[in-house]
Image: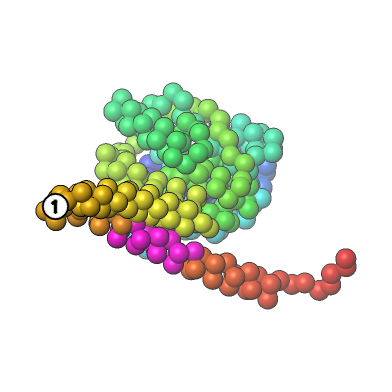
Amino acid sequence: MVVPARDEEHTVEQLYAELAIALDELDPEWEVVYVDDGSVDATFAAMTRLHERHDNVRVVRLRRNAGKAAALDAGFAEAEGTVVVTIDCDLQDDPAEIPRLLAKLEEGFDLVAGWKSDRADPRARRLLSRVFNTVAGRMSGLRIHDMNCGLKAFRANVVQELPLYGELHRFIPVLAHDRGFRVTEVAVRHRPRTHGRSRYGVERYVRGFLDLLTVTFMGRYRHRPLHLFGGLGLGLSTGGFAILLYLTIVKLTGDAIGGRPLLTLGVLLVVVGIQFLSLGLLSELITSQHVERMRALARRDAPVDEILR
C-alpha cells in the first residue's frame, strides 16, 4: 500500500484500521507506506505512532509539499511487494474495495483503476470531473470513466516505469496504457469527506488540461515527433503556397497585390510551415540519438554471460 497524505492527522490511524480489516485475511504480510507530503499539522506524528506500534508501517516524509505525483513516486520507491495499491488518506475511498481490485488484477490486467461511479462530491465538481474525463479519454485514446481516482492496484513493474512528476498523477492510467500495459477499471464505493477540506478547484482542471496535452504528445509522438510537427508544417506551407500561387495568377493578369493582406498571410504561412518542418527534423535527430545512446548503455550494462543459439 502507498498512501500519500497532506494535513490528514485525523484520518491516518482510522485508515490503517480499515486497511487491516480489508487485507489481513488476504495477505498477512501486507505493508503500508505512508508519505507525508509536507504537512503542517500533526500528520507525521500520527504516522510515527503507527510506525512504532506496527511492523508493517513505513513512513516517508518529504521536506516540503511537493505534490501528489512526487509523493506517490517516493512511496513507489519504498514499496517492495509484487502488487502495489494506492489510496488517498482522506477516507473517501473505501479500503473494503481493495480485494475487488486485486481480483480484477488477477484476470491478467496490469493496472486496475477505481471508478467513483456514485461520487459523493458537490455537483459542480462532479460535472467538471465528467467533462475532464471525457476530454481526456478522447485525446488519450484510453476510454475509462475516472482517470484520477486515488484507489488503484498495480503490478510492481508498472510503477517502476511510470514517469511521475509535476501533476501527472492524474493520468497514471494513460501513462501505463501508452507503455503497453493492460488497463481496466472497477466501480468502487465513494464516501463523503468527513475531515479536512478538498484542495481541488477549477484551476486544477485548467492545469490538468495542460498536463493532458503533455501526456498526449509524449504518448503519441514521443518517438515520432516529425509526424506532429511535419504534419503541421506541411499543412501550413501548403496553404501558404496556394495563397501565393493565387496571388501570382492575379499579378499576371495585371492587378496589384502589394497592398493585399492575403500576401502577408501567404508568406507567413510558408515561413511558419518551414519552421515547423525544421523543428520536426531536429526532434527526430535528437530522438534517434537518444534511442541509440540508451540502446548502447543497455547492451553495455546487460549481465550477459553466455548466449546459445
Q: Is residue 272 magenta?
A: yes
262 sits to left or right of 197: left
Q: Is residue 183 visible?
A: yes
The amino acid at mark 1 is: Ala
Instruction: Report the residue at 34% width, 36% height from top.
Output: 195
117 sits to left or right of 300: left
Instruction: Report the residue at 41% width, 32% height from top.
Output: 134
283 sits to left or right of 110: left
Main secondary structure along the magenta-highlighted residues: helix
Q: Residue furthest bottom?
A: 300
Query: Where does the image place residue 122, in percent across and percent down from the top left?
Result: 31, 27
Q: What is the magenta range?
A: 271-284
Instruction: Report the residue at 67% width, 42% height from top.
Output: 27
Instruction: Report the residue at 35% width, 45% height from top.
Output: 208
Above or below, comparing residue 280 to residue 153 in the picture: below
- Residue toward you, 147 or 261: 261
Reading the image, the residue beneath label 1 is 256
Query: Where does the image place residue 37, in percent across and percent down from the top left?
Result: 39, 54
Q: Is residue 18 magenta?
A: no
Above or below, comparing residue 141 to residue 187 in the picture: below
Query: Where does the image place residue 281, in percent across and percent down from the top left?
Result: 45, 64
